[in-house]
């Protein structure tokens, strides 16, 4: 097996045109870099494979881009693991299909990785198409961050501000607890130390958990804002739109949340996270009775769904018709 400087893994799930657009933005940035692109189709069961392979053939990039079709939907972690195992490389770039690589983003990330020995995970600045930056660097979720989230009340947020999950967007290269895996460069040595991503996370919280285990093993997580990647947030998952509309979130979100809190904080920590969330929900519900214009920042049935998987927190769930 050839060892490349860089292997890029892109998961496609029923977003063939987005994946092609991502490839169009990516390939020019790989010039002069020993790189291989693995597109993993996560059992889309549509015309995705046909459309993507047709584009690969038409552009004659079949030596640089390989389409790997999974017979089953492995979720985010499992799909990425499949792509990672396919190619041996010094670095692995996990890339969402709803991203567009901006000029010199790849080489900027690689250069930062080469000169920072203790850094195992490196992310770019994620931004909207108009250049507005997105929050993409975070503190670890904790029981107190659950209270902050569900209470959505100023004095509680200020009281526990050191536990608030998102960091403000920064123009300075610095280290964080974890970063969005919409685009992240990971050193192969990190996988050698802690293994691949936990495929018990179908989708969501896998990036938090992986970063946690990497930091436990002595690796740092760093953001390089001089590398720019557009993140359209219009990919395979309906999570963002559902949360915005306060509709019920997918089961796999809560399954992953439960797995994370159990793995990081133990059974009591998981219980404490749920109790803290419930306390915050009570606060925001009471506030909504007093202030007619205030609405609790919670999704439908969330008070009940946070308990999904509570008695089997490490069970692996499958969702063949979701990303």
Image (cartoon, rainbow, N blue to C red):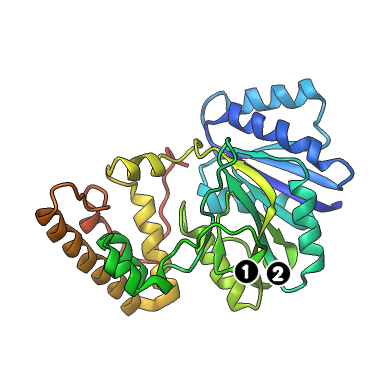
Q: Residue at x 81, y 64 (%)?
A: 114
User: What element does badge 2 sit on?
Assistant: strand
The local crowd at label 1, few if under 14, some if 14 to 19, many if 20 or more residues have their Cα within 10 Å, is some
Where residue 202 sits: x, y (%)? 46, 52
Q: Quadrant of residue 116?
A: bottom right
User: What element does badge 1 sit on?
Assistant: strand
Apparent side of residue 205 relative to residue 58 in the rendered image (left or right): left
The earlier-in-sequence mark between 1 and 2 is 2
Tags 1 and 2 touching, CB below 8 Å: yes
Between residues 290 and 82, which one lies in front from this camera angle? Answer: 290
Q: CA distance from mark 1 to mark 2?
A: 9 Å
Q: Is residue 307 visible?
A: no
Q: Residue at x 34, y 41 (%)?
A: 242
Q: Is residue 72 visible?
A: yes
**Looking at the image, residue 20 lies above or below residue 278:** above
**Looking at the image, residue 178 lies above or below residue 265:** above
Q: Give the numbered dot on residue 119.
A: 2
Where residue 139 sits: x, y (%)? 49, 68
Q: Residue at x 66, y 35 (%)?
A: 22
From this viewpoint, which residue is outermost toward the right? Answer: 32
Where residue 104 sits: x, y (%)? 78, 45
Between residues 244 and 44, which one lies in front from this camera angle? Answer: 244
Where residue 188 sits: x, y (%)? 74, 63
Residue carrying label 1: 175
Apparent side of residue 298 relative to residue 123 in the rendered image (left or right): left
């Amino acid at each position: 097996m050839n060892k490349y400087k860089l292997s890029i893994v892109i998961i496609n799930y029923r977003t063939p045109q987005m994946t092609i657009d991502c490839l169009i933005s990516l390939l020019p940035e790989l010039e002069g870099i020993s790189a291989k692109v693995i597109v993993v189709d996560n059992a889309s069961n549509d015309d995705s494979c046909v459309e993507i392979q047709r584009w690969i053939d038409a552009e004659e990039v079949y030596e640089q881009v390989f389409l790997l079709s999974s017979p089953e939907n492995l979720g985010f972690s499992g799909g990425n693991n499949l792509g990672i195992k396919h190619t041996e490389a010094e670095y692995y770039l996990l890339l969402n299909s709803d991203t567009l690589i901006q000029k010199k983003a790849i080489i900027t990330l690689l250069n930062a990785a080469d000169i920072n020995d203790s850094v195992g995970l490196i992310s770019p600045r994620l931004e909207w198409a108009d250049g507005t930056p997105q929050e993409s660097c975070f503190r670890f979720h904790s029981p107190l961050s659950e209270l902050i989230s569900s209470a959505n009340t100023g004095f509680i947020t200020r009281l526990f501000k050191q536990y608030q999950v998102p960091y403000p967007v920064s123009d300075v290269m610095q280290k964080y607890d974890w970063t969005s895996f919409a685009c992240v460069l990971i050193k192969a040595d990190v996988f050698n130390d802690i293994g691949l991503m936990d495929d018990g996370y179908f989708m969501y919280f896998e990036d938090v958990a992986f970063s946690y285990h990497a930091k436990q093993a002595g690796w740092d997580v760093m953001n390089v804002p001089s590398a720019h990647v557009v993140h359209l947030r219009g990919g395979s998952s309906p999570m963002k739109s559902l949360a915005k509309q306060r509709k019920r979130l997918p089961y796999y979100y809560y399954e992953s949340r439960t797995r994370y809190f159990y793995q990081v904080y133990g059974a009591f920590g998981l219980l404490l996270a749920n109790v803290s969330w419930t306390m915050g929900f009570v606060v925001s519900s009471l506030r909504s009775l007093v202030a007619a214009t205030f609405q609790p920042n919670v999704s439908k049935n969330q008070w009940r769904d946070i308990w999904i998987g509570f008695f089997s927190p490490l069970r692996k769930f499958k969702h063949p018709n979701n990303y």
